[in-house]
Image (cartoon, coloured by chain):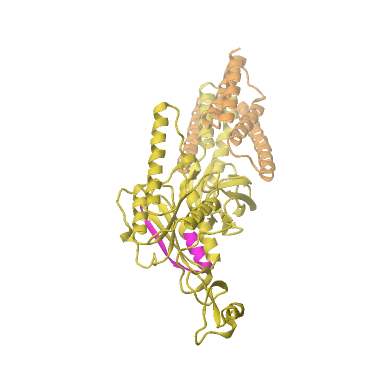
Chain colours: A orange, B yellow
Amino acid sequence: MPFAGLGTLAGISLAVGVAGRWAVFVQTALSLLLAEYAGFLLERGEVDARAPLFAAGLLVAGELGYAALEPPATRRSFARGAALLAVLGAAAAALGVLLLAAAAASGGSLAEEVVGFAAAAATIALVARLAWTARR
Amino acid sequence: MTRAATPKLAGYTGLAALSLFLGLALRLPELVVAGAPFAVLVTLALLLDRPPDVDVRVEFDRDRVLEDEEVEVRLEVRANAPAEIFVGLPLDLRVVDGDNPFAVSGDDERTLRLRPVRWGAFVPGVVHVRAYDPLRVVRYERRLDQHVPLKVFPRQETLRALARPRDTQVFSGNQVAWTKGDGIEFADLRPFAPGDLVRRVNWRASARRSELWVNEYHPERNADVVIYVDAFAEASSGDASTLDDTVRAAASLAAHYLREKDRVGLISFGGTLNWLVPTTGLAQLYRIIDALLDSRIVLSYAWRNLNVIPRGTLPSHALVIALTPLLDERATDALLNLRARGFDLAVVEISPLRYVSPGRSAAEHVAHRLWELRREAERARYERAGVPVAVCREDGSLGGAIEEVRAFRRFARSGR
């Protein structure tokens, strides 16, 4: 039930965001979907092999949600956007498969966890740095 | 070109950070799998980001149109990235066909069909361009100033007859002068005098009187007409105002008098003073219309009189046609001053009544009635000075008002 509630909230938030062209609601919807998936994984207790599909779906949902905030596209740009979306979804799924395989191969030692945290922090720092540069 | 992040950039960055850290904290590699594509997408987009090259060329199919006549704007877009284009247009230029703003994904050509709803001199052509990188995480905005002038001329009314001036000038024209001279309009008979042309002898009258009599004629001369635009105040409602009606009437009168080979001048008297010395020809019509397009009400409390009008703008013996809404006492005083100086004056009142609601309460009705009475008193001041005042109402055309002026001048002889 809590998962269904989170999913419903995410759907409503996405609908409100698209209808009112408010980006913050699209962002909230994506975060709620992620939270719902995290809760589902915690309850499940074992590795979910469909995670790459969820990753691809979440990315496609995000792309469509943000695209809906923009003015209507021309037919040519719509076709180009649809092709790009398909490529992005496939790439996200492929990346997910690679990451899951890497996670399965790792032993889960303390050193690997430290390296994992460092890598995550470095990734976020890099993205944040690039985003900050873009904002300026 | 200014660069800014789209909401997507912040959203994806936050989502990637949340999923990566939650995944590590909760030991759930699936969350890392879910968040990694967002981080990769943002990183790739920012690393591959290059400023797009977008240019827009704006072109009108004409540079002069009449009110309510449609005009096409051709937009030639050169873009190497997806972009949104918005052409800034004045409120009086309404888009009747075409999208504004519109999206393009590369080189494109668009056409907007515009309808000007009011006269004026417009300089549209400010184009706002918003372009994106291919993954739409960075936005580029640019403002292109392509000032393309467009003149919207006021509608002109067809007038069947014009108010005739009291005096004519020395050049030939279409007005029958009061004086006698060479012409085709019969004036009188007189006895033959040495030097008279034989073809002017009226043989029938000569035979009756047993001596030679000759015909006299009225010559056809041109006249000086000065159109006086009262720009002290206006009454308006929505998009329309008395100034709009005044400008349309002035343009119609100028066109018709110039067609009659008269010399036409313009005085726009209000918070600011604009004038054109009377002259004739098509070029003068365009000069007058250009001057009228710049007409606007400039609020001023200064008490102005006719001393500020340059010498030569008001030639003696000129017919002055004043277009006024009778809303400002300064205009009335200036016009009566003109009359006192001996100018041939006719007043066409551009009625502001249709722009003024009488109100709903009894007090508002009384105020409206008092205001109307005051306007009648203003009209009476003109009539006491021998100046015809014709009212151009919503239902009546300018032609009707001019006909009123003609009737007044036909039956009331004004003294100098």
Q: Between residues B60 and A99, which one lies in front from this camera angle? A: B60
Compared to A79, does B194 lie above or below? below
Compared to B164, does B388 lie above or below? above
State the residue lying farthest toward the top: A1
Can residue B51 be seen from the camera position used here?
no
Residue at 62% over, 52% down: B70
Q: Which residues are magenta?
A: B271-290
Q: Between residues B141 and B133, which one lies in front from this camera angle? A: B141
Could you tell me residue B79's position as x and y percent?
60, 52
Could you tell me residue B323's position as x and y percent?
45, 53
Name which quarter of the figure residue B204 lies in: bottom right
Could you tell me residue B213's position as x and y percent?
55, 80
Compared to B353, does B364 lie above or below? above
| Quadrant containing the C terminus of chain B in the rendered view | bottom left
Could you tell me residue A97's position as x and y percent?
65, 31
Q: Is residue B289 part of the magenta span, yes or no?
A: yes
Can residue B320 be seen from the camera position used here?
yes
Compared to B185, does B407 lie above or below? above
